[in-house]
Amino acid sequence: MMDRIYLDHAATTPVTKPVLEAMLPYFTDCYGNASSIHGTGRDARRGVENAREKVAKALGADSTSEIYFTSGGTESDNWAIKGYCLANQDRGRHLICSCIEHHAVLHTCESLRKMGFSLTVLPVDSEGFVDPEDVRKALRKDTILVSVMTANNEIGTLEPIREIAQIVHGQGALMHTDAVQAVGAIPLDVSEVGVDMLSLSGHKLGAPKGVGALYMKKGTHIQPFMDGGEQERRLRAGTENVPGIVGLGQAVEDAVQRLPAFTQKVRSLRDDLRYRILEAIPDVLVNGPRDSRLPGNLNISLLGLEGESVLLRLDLAGIAASSGSACTAGSLDPSHVLMAIGRTRQEAQSSLRLTLGWENTKEEIDVTVDVLKEIVHDLRSLRLH
């Protein structure tokens, strides 16, 4: 039996060996509660603060006090948006997001709308880009927060965050970005980009599931995420997930160090995969931009087919892929991202997302194209009979 080929890194990534090795002592020798004042607790606290330093450095934060650990990207998005809007509603009750945000953002914004906030959802163009001028036009005197993702999780579009942030700040509002797909995949410095809050998740870059972080610029007024203990400077109660936090710190540090090599390798594999699919298989649409996209992201529509059927056949052949966001797997609705860029319902439901990681090889790309070509031929032949 052949080894499985994993092409679903946008959904999650394997924990890397250095991350696992960094975490192991915090399950055994350094197992203390990081809030305890005895030696065992202080050992755990050092692990947490060391990880905080690594994340702050990787993001270009001014201080470690701007990094707050969470359970992942969804919590970070919820906390940033709800926490800020509820804490600052005396200044205004209008917020803005894009129509292709992850549901962790879209549903959070919709929840605030039901609480009486005004919400403007911005359109995107045929490649998934938010027009900064649309942001400018949507801003109002009572706008307090704008949330636009750094990189789209389905089609990989890299948004003009720096330009949008400048426009937002010019109106006196704050800028949040969901950077879950971007951290570790592209260079990202919060001081250069100019965002006030940024969400990230560990399991997208080689750390375990269940840990993430929220960057909040110093001086940001926000409600606590949970009531309880004194953890995370009284803003995020709950005993710290010390092994996970240590793993996140190691993963972020490693990702930044290998970023140039990662980008070159993964982009090359992605471009080869795209070229070979378009050459070998007729009636294929590429979704999203050609260049300004995540290096490992390829999203295509195989016209005339159901994406779920292709996925099942790929899985039987030992190849893991996706038809969109893992958080909507099992839904019968077409991708809101693909519909937003102008795909028909049928084109959206024929989509296939192939996302590459550090461990993928040229040989795996060759096998994938050969298998996919055969699957598409078989499925289309069945439709003709």
Image (cartoon, rainbow, N blue to C red):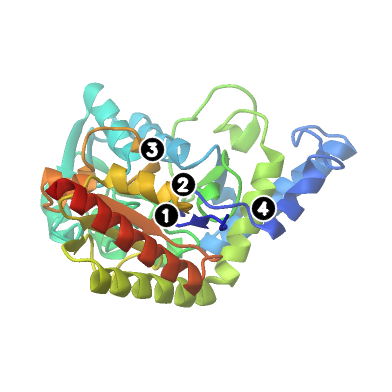
- Give the Cα distance between marks 2 and 4: 22 Å
| Mark 1 element type | loop
Counting residues from the start of the chain, the first of labels 1 and 4 encountered is 4
Q: Residues within 10 Å of mark 1 (few under 14, many from 20)?
A: many
Give the amino acid type for the residue marked by disc 2 in the picture.
Gly
Q: Position of residue 167 (x, y in %)?
A: 22, 59
Counting residues from the start of the chain, the first of labels 1 and 2 encountered is 1
Residue behind mark 3: 327
Closest to the camera, between mark 1 and mark 2, is 1
Residue 71, quarter of picture:
top right
Closest to the camera, between mark 3 and mark 4, is 3
Q: Position of residue 222 (x, y in %)?
A: 43, 36
Q: Residues within 10 Å of mark 2 (few under 14, many from 20)?
A: few
Residue behind mark 4: 51
Closest to the camera, between mark 2 and mark 4, is 4
- Residue sitting at the far front: 385
Q: Position of residue 373 (x, y in %)?
A: 30, 63
Counting residues from the start of the chain, the first of labels 3 and 1 encountered is 1
Residue behind mark 1: 181
Give the amino acid type for the residue marked by disc 4 in the picture.
Ala
Q: Is residue 133 left or right of residue 325?
A: left
Counting residues from the start of the chain, the first of labels 2 and 4 encountered is 4
